[in-house]
Every structure is written in C-alpha cells, then in structure tokens.
C-alpha cells in the first residue's frame, strides 16, 4: 500500500471514532432512554437461589432475567460472595435457561400508596387481585420504611375499644400498642381476629395475610370483613404458594401502607396473620444463600428482622397511631418456640389462646393467666387495675385446684380462697365468653367486670352453705 492510501485509511478510522464518540456524547447529554447498561449472566441455580456474575448491584435492588422466549423474570439481590450475586425470584421461575442475561433495573424499593387503596386487595408486589382495575395512586413510600426517633413517638395513654369483653376488661389495649396473638391450630385464632377486625374503632384497617392458605383470603374478605368492613380496609395477600421473597414483601408492604395512613394523622389497625410465616420466609431465604442455622433451624437474620418489622408500628409524632396485632403460631402449643419467644420480647403484650378452653366450648378461648398487656397500667384507672388483679387471683386459684374440685377430693371449708374461687368461677367464666357476632364496647366491658367482682361476698356466702352436700357425698 502507498503512503497516501495509509494516510486515507487512518483518516477514515479517525473520523469513524469521532463520529461514534460524538453519538455517545449526544445520547448522554440528552438523557436518552437508550442508555448503555451493564448486563451479567446467570451461572447457577439451586432451589430458589440464583447466582449471577458480570455486574454489580446493591442488596435489595431488582434485576430482570431474560427467560426462554424473551419472558422477563424479576428477582431481587439478597446476597453476594466475591463476584457472585445471589438473587431470589419474586415469582414463577419456569423458563430460566443457563447463561440467561441478567440486567439490573432499579435499586430503590418504593411502593405506591394513596386513598385509592381503601377497599382493594393486592399481593406482595402491590398488584391488584380483586379485578377492580389498576390502582390510581400518586404517592409512594419506601417498602422498608423510615426509622422513627424513639423520642419522637407519643406515649401510649389512651385505650382502644376492640369490642371483645375479655380483652377490653382484662387485657386492655392502648392506641399504638403492638400485641401478639399466640395460638396453635384450631383454637379460634381466625375467629377472634375477625371479631377484632369488625369491632375495633379505627379509621383504617390494614390486613396482611402472609403465608396462610389461599382459600382463607376470600373467606376473610367476604365472611369476616364484608362490604362495610372492606370499604375502610386494605388487604395484602401473599399466601403460602407465593415465593418466600413475596411473603416477606407482603408483610413489609402492609406495614408501609399502615405507616402512610398513620402519617396522615389517622388511627390505623394493622392485623398480620402471621408473624411466624414471615419468620419462616426469611429462614428459607437465609438458609438458601448459606447462612448457618442458630436456634431450632432459624438463622440469626430472622431474629434481627423481626424487630425491624414490629418497631415500625406504634404511635407517630402527629397524633396518628398504628395499633398492630400479630398472630404467632405455636406449633404443638409450644410457647417456647423460638419465634414465639422472640415475639414476646419485642411486643407490648400477648394474648394466648388455650386449647383446653376451646375444647370446653369457651370462646374466645383467651387464657387470662398466660396473657398480659404491658401498657394496661398506663391506660386504665387504679380501681380498674385492682379489679383485674383480683379477677386473676381468683381465676388462678380455681384453675390450680380444678382437678381436685372436679373429682370431689376437695372438702368445702378447707381453704377460704378455694371456697371463694369455686363460688365465683361460673361468673368469671361468663365474663370471658362472648358470641362472635355480639360486640361489647369498652364501657360495658368495664361495667360488667365491676359488677361481677362486687358480687363476690354474696356469691361466696351462698355457695359455702351448700358446699358440704356438694363435695362430701362420698
């Protein structure tokens, strides 16, 4: 080649490079949507854990994986090791292929919120499930919430009427309190939750159905909430057949929606069924990415995440409040289950449902001895508190000696305290029973407690006179 041709070729290459650089600069200056993006590839899949290389993304960011036939599959970054990113899919993973393209799409986790959510049923990604069309909301809030300075929280000083006499009178709930509803299977947990949903005084009700049976979603909406209840409620449903990540997001989303309405100064009732399924979803994710188990198969991250969720509820700084009730499943009625034990430590009280009472046909089957409301001394007067303590003493005395009483081994007059408990127990039992469709408001509940306890001496004297013939027939 001649020198002239070499010079011409170099000039052409130079001009080509200048043109390409000018094009890139133009695209950057004009903030074009056609921006260069870094992509990686899928290298491994074990269970629900996906491994990708070739790009970097922060924890919690979303990625899009190109499946077979161009079908996009969304996943979230849940961990990393060296150059490997661990991803967890948010939905169906069918269609994934080896070396599939992985592209980060966004790093913030914002969820849409607004008044239009009232009366709607959504999944863990805030997508409608009720067939009522798209959500017409303009605002958005972080999925994981914003920490509140504990000194900015208003103290709990006002009671909340939940319409259940045993709770109103003996385990009084305060506005902004976080309560745990501890129960095994088949002891009336869903029924009690439904009663509190319908009867509680609240501006907005947010219901999170996390990890439960899918059929319960429609039953809860139609049979428990009804049209009137749904009008002031938002239901977030992420049942058991959803991915563990979506179950986590469902609990976070329900809390974010409750925070939005609280920040508007409203009184919000947050019901989450259940906190145990939330913990189990985190356990699935943590074990899948290699975190070692610590307590009965639960890794440490579970016990770190629980308070992060629960502490988001409570009173705000502008008069709004989230009163939260979390159900906790006690497998085999084991109150020392790791999740149950951790929940008791971070909640403001717990209501335990008793299988023994349930089998005896006593509903709601609230175990008064095993339940407590930690804020009750701050929201009721001294006389009310004294009557509750008196009730507990009598009730406990009877249950501790119930076997002796039932078989006739106790002789009347042996112990005045037991005599008093025997005389009073039918009335105490009547106080804690209630029909599932019969609300009893706060004032009526307190009045019934006072009336019951004031009749102690009369009832005791009458029964003491009859006891010899009742217990000494042998």
Image: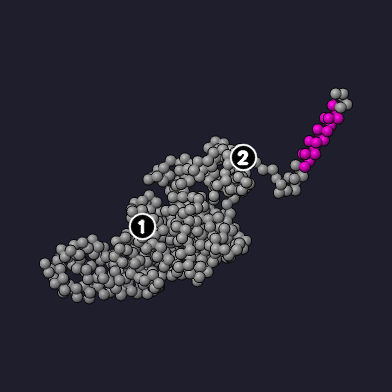
> In the rendered view, how is the structure colored?
one colour
Residue drawn at point x = 88 percent, y = 26 percent: 4
x and y, in percent, of residue 151 in the image: 48, 57
Name the residue that disc number 2 marks.
40
Q: 10 Å neighbourhood of mark 1: few (<14), some, or many (≥20)?
A: some
Does the image show residue 377? no
Residue drawn at point x = 50 percent, y = 71 percent: 228
Quick check: 21 above or below 200?
above
Q: Nearer the viewer, residue 80 or 444?
A: 80
Residue 263 lies in quadrant: bottom right
Residue drawn at point x = 53 percent, y = 55 percent: 124
Q: Secondary structure under badge 2? A: strand
**Within the magenta stretch, is there residue 196?**
no
Q: 10 Å neighbourhood of mark 2: few (<14), some, or many (≥20)?
A: some
Going by the image, does 141 lie left or right of 293?
right
Quick check: 64 above or below 18?
below
Q: Which mark is residue 184?
A: 1
Q: Residue furthest front?
A: 69
The earlier-in-sequence mark between 2 and 1 is 2
Q: Which mark is residue 95?
A: none
Mark 2–mark 1 Cα distance, whole angstroms, equals 46 Å
x and y, in percent, of residue 370 in the image: 32, 59
Quick check: 4 above or below 101?
above
Residue drawn at point x = 58 percent, y = 54 percent: 110
Magenta residues, as a range?
Answer: 6-23
x and y, in percent, of residue 50 in the image: 54, 42
Marks 2,1: beta carbons within 8 A: no
Image quadrant in which the C terminus is located? bottom left
Q: Nearer the viewer, residue 318 or 445?
A: 445
């Amino acid at each position: 080649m001649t020198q002239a041709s070499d010079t011409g070729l170099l000039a052409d290459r130079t001009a080509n490079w200048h043109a390409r650089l000018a094009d890139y600069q133009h695209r950057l200056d004009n903030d074009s949507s056609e921006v260069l993006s870094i992509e990686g590839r899928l290298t491994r899949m074990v269970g629900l854990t996906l491994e990708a290389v070739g790009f970097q993304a922060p924890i919690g960011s979303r990625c899009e994986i190109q499946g077979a036939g161009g079908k996009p599959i969304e996943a979230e970054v849940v961990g990393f090791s060296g150059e490997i990113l661990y991803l967890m899919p948010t939905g169906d993973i069918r269609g994934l292929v080896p070396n599939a393209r992985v592209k980060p799409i966004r790093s913030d986790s914002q969820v849409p919120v607004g008044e239009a959510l009232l009366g709607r049923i959504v999944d863990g990604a805030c997508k409608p499930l009720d067939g009522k069309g798209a959500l017409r909301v303009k605002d958005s809030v972080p999925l994981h919430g914003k920490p509140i300075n504990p000194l900015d929280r208003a103290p709990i000083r006002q009671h909340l009427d939940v319409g259940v006499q045993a709770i109103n009178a003996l385990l009084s709930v305060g506005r902004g309190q976080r309560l745990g509803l501890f129960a095994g299977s088949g002891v009336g947990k869903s029924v009690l939750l439904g009663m509190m949903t319908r009867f509680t005084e609240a501006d907005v009700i947010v219901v999170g159905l996390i990890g439960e049976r899918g059929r319960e979603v429609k039953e809860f909406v139609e049979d428990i909430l009804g049209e009137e209840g749904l009008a002031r409620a938002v239901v977030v449903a992420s049942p058991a057949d959803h991915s563990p990540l979506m179950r986590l997001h469902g609990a976070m989303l329900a809390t974010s929606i409750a925070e939005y309405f609280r920040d508007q100064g409203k009184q919000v009732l947050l019901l989450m069924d259940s906190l145990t399924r939330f913990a189990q979803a985190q356990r699935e994710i943590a074990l899948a990415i290699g975190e070692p188990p610590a307590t009965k198969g639960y890794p440490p991250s579970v016990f770190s995440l629980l308070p992060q969720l629960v502490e988001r509820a409570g009173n705000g700084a502008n008069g709004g409040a989230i009163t939260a009730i979390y159900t906790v499943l006690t497998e085999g009625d084991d109150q020392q289950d790791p999740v149950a034990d951790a929940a008791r430590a971070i909640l403001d009280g717990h209501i335990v449902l008793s299988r023994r009472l349930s089998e005896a046909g006593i509903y709601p089957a609230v175990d008064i001895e095993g339940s407590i409301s930690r804020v009750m001394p701050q929201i009721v007067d001294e006389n009310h508190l004294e009557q509750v303590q008196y009730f507990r003493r009598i009730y406990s005395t009877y249950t501790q000696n119930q076997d002796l009483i039932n078989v006739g081994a106790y002789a009347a007059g042996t112990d005045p305290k037991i005599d008093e408990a025997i005389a009073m127990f039918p009335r105490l039992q009547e106080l804690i029973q209630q029909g599932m469709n019969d609300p009893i408001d706060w004032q009526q509940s307190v009045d019934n407690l006072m009336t019951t306890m004031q009749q102690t001496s009369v009832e005791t004297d009458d029964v003491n006179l009859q006891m010899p013939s009742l217990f000494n027939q042998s």
